[in-house]
Amino acid sequence: NERKCHKIAAIGADGIGPEVISAGIAVLRALSEALGSFDLDFTEYDWSSDTYKKTGNYIPDGGLDELRKHDAIFFGAVGAPDVPDHISLWGLRLAICQTFQQYANVRPTRILLGTQSPLRNCGPRDLDWIIVRENSEGEYAGQGGRSHRGQPWETATEVAIFTRHGIERLMRFGFEIARQRPRKLLTVVTKSNAQRNGLVLWDEVAAEVAKDFPDVKVDKMLVDAMTARMVLAPKSLDTIVATNLHADILSDLAAALAGSIGIAPTSNLDPTRQNPSMFEPIHGSAFDITGKGVANPVATFWTAAEMLAWLGEETAAAELMICVESVCEAGIVTADLGGTSTTVQVTEAVISEIKKRH
Ligand code: NAI
Ligand code: MG
């Protein structure tokens, strides 16, 4: 009965990122001590927009090889007011996602106990979704260019790339997730009426893969109609698969419908497990509240639970979510959820809940 030790690389990065990641590490340490069933070994990396401003790079030479030695990456947020967002995003977050072939981005959404949806009559059990986002190609493939800079005829292209390989691996992963859930329902989001090449291939591959999952019900939605359905009939959805751009937008809507962007987690997964996967809250670096001690750490705690589940510690993950939800239910929440507690108070409450239960 050997205790497993999971090696975690922690990168807080910018803004509230370091604040929520240190809260997450404290809670994870308390959980592993209380349960005694596994160990966690954290290595912290201070890569951020400050590193970029000093050295011209977000990730130092050999940095990605360092990360590769870990079982998972626990990430805060990147983005600074004085660095263009496309530089920070591609310099750190996307550099990691692409190098490690984290082609599936998974975003669970539900209404935690003690929190409220802005939707009328939508209680905790009425909204329980998993959005699976294509995370390696599509509209964010990075293909395109700009010419005739500054001229009235300046031209820019942003080319969406859809490959059979990329779509198929993502669809299979989406169907697998749907199959593991009680409802076995997968909604494939598309826009193949207007985007008649890439998204027609998307639909065709979805239909082919569906044949291997006869036990999963498939349902196809145009992305525009999907936004309305998420708002008007949240109960009718379960697992959702969508392109990089579509799912990026839908998952922010999902987070808002669940009460706050401050609670939503995401996982960037390499389902082949050849590379470490990366776990992060979906929110950004939130300059407006940085350093004030009021960032909601719940998104990071839920992220930590998703990371534990991926590492095979499903029981610990479930325990952590029970503790987080009972703290929310007790009204110990930050301002974004209508409360008055600080990041540290919420963190300490979760830690004492963990200790109380074990
Ligand atoms: P944001 O998520 O940082 O902030 C949006 C709003 O939500 C702000 O009012 C903020 O105060 C609030 N908020 C976010 N997280 C919160 C939390 N944990 N607790 C309480 N309130 C919270 O998005 P924004 O303002 O569009 O982006 C700011 C920077 O973050 C930009 O540089 C952007 O590129 C970057 N960003 C990075 C991401 C990443 O690293 N994965 C994701 C999204 C944005
Ligand atoms: Mg986004």
Image: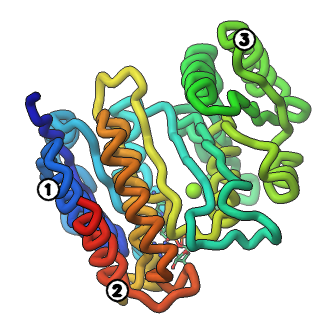
Lateral position of residue 102 relative to residue 254, left or right = left
The CA distance from mark 1 to mark 2 is 26 Å
Q: Which one is earlier in the sequence, the residue at label 2 or at label 3?
A: 3
Please tell me whether mark 3 or mark 1 is closer to you in this view. Answer: 1
- Residue for point 70% across, 51% down: 250
List the single residue furthest toward the front: 357
- Residue for point 46% across, 75% down: 286
Instruction: Determine crowd level at label 3: few under 14, some 14-19, many 20+ residues with C-alpha closer than 10 A.
Output: few
* Rendered position, 224 above or below 259: above
Mark 2 residue CB less than 8 A from any atom of ligand 1: no
Instruction: Determine crowd level at label 1: few under 14, some 14-19, many 20+ residues with C-alpha closer than 10 A.
Output: some
Label 3 SS: loop
Mark 3 residue CB less than 8 A from any atom of ligand 2: no
Label of residue 293 in the image: 2
Label 2 SS: loop
Mark 1 residue CB less than 8 A from any atom of ligand 1: no
- 2 and 3 marks in contact (CB < 8 Å): no
Tell me the quadrant of the picture where the N terminus can be found. Answer: top left
Q: Quadrant of residue 205?
A: top right
Instruction: From the image, tell me which residue sits under label 1.
Output: 33
Please tell me whether mark 1 or mark 2 is closer to you in this view. Answer: 1
Residue 42 horizontal/vertical position (percent) = 14, 52
Q: Quadrant of residue 212?
A: top right
Instruction: From the image, tell me which residue sits under label 3.
Output: 214
Tell me the amino acid under the disc marked 1.
Glu
Tell me the amino acid under the disc marked 3.
Pro
Tell me the amino acid under the disc marked 2.
Gly
* Rendered position, 81 above or below 314: below
